[in-house]
Amino acid sequence: MPDLGFACRCGELRGVVAEVSPADYTHIACHCADCRSAYTHLGLADPEKVEILQTAQDRIRITQGGENLRIMRLSPKGALRWYATCCDTPLFFTPTKARFVHVGVNADRLDDATEAGPVVAEAFIPAPDGKATHKGMPKMVGKMLVRMAAKNLNGHWKDSPFFEADGTTPTVTPKVLTREERAAALMGVGRT
Ligand SMILES: [Zn+2]
Ligand SMILES: [Zn+2]
């Protein structure tokens, strides 16, 4: 099975999504303000939607520059949003525990995003009435739960590069955005 390479914008941090076939991941696009504000907080343009390759944490191998990994949380209980501090590039999204297995890899960082195939699900698509709509969610969630069940059964949830052996301590101490920082990041997201 092939590896999908990824890198931060400056190329200091590199890695692979190892040995994956399309059955092992879901290529989605998320339009939510939180995913986009991870970019604006780092001083990047609002991407308007974030394409994400959802897979299992044990598929991720950081091959170089891992010392550049940092974590931001948009709120004290928020998910972990991993980025490269060498060039302020958002890279991954994980829940707060290795046992949840899930990781989202920002597809804009893949060496060749076309290898990930088409987007098969979309979340928080803005609608004219102001309410968001979703596409393909049941299948997306189903695949996430199947991965979680499988890795909890075979113990591979422990092979996460994102957490210490206890499965709950991230390898880097997260920085929680202040209310002001969060508000400023959301201001940068082009929606009212
Ligand atoms: Zn999102
Ligand atoms: Zn970099």
Image (cartoon, rainbow, N blue to C red):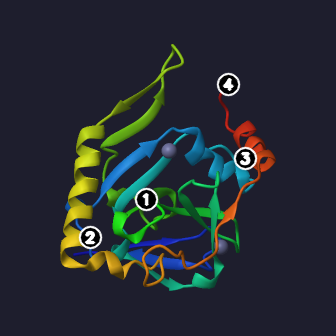
Q: Are marks 3 and 4 in contact (CB under 8 Å)?
A: no
Q: Is residue 77 visible?
A: yes
Q: Is residue 30 above or below residue 112?
A: above
* Lower sequence index among marks 1 and 3: 1
Q: Nearer the viewer, mark 3 or mark 2?
A: 3
Label 1, ligand 1: CB separation under 8 Å: no
Total label count? 4
Does the residue at mark 4 contact the one at mark 2 (Cβ under 8 Å)?
A: no
User: Is there a contact, CB below 8 Å, between mark 2 and mark 1?
Assistant: no
Q: Give SS at disc 4.
A: loop
Please tell me which residue lies in front, 113 or 51. Answer: 51
Instruction: Give me the C-alpha separation between circle 3 and circle 4.
Output: 15 Å
Instruction: Point out which mark residue 182 bears.
Output: 3
Real-space CA distance between mark 2 and mark 1, rounded to the nearest whole angstrom? 14 Å
Amino acid beneath label 1:
Gly
Q: Whole-percent x and y of residue 76? A: 64, 55
For label 2, the residue is 20
Residue furthest out toward the right:
180
The residue at the point 41 percent across, 76 percent down is: 16
Where, by quadrant of the figure, is residue 87 drawn? bottom right
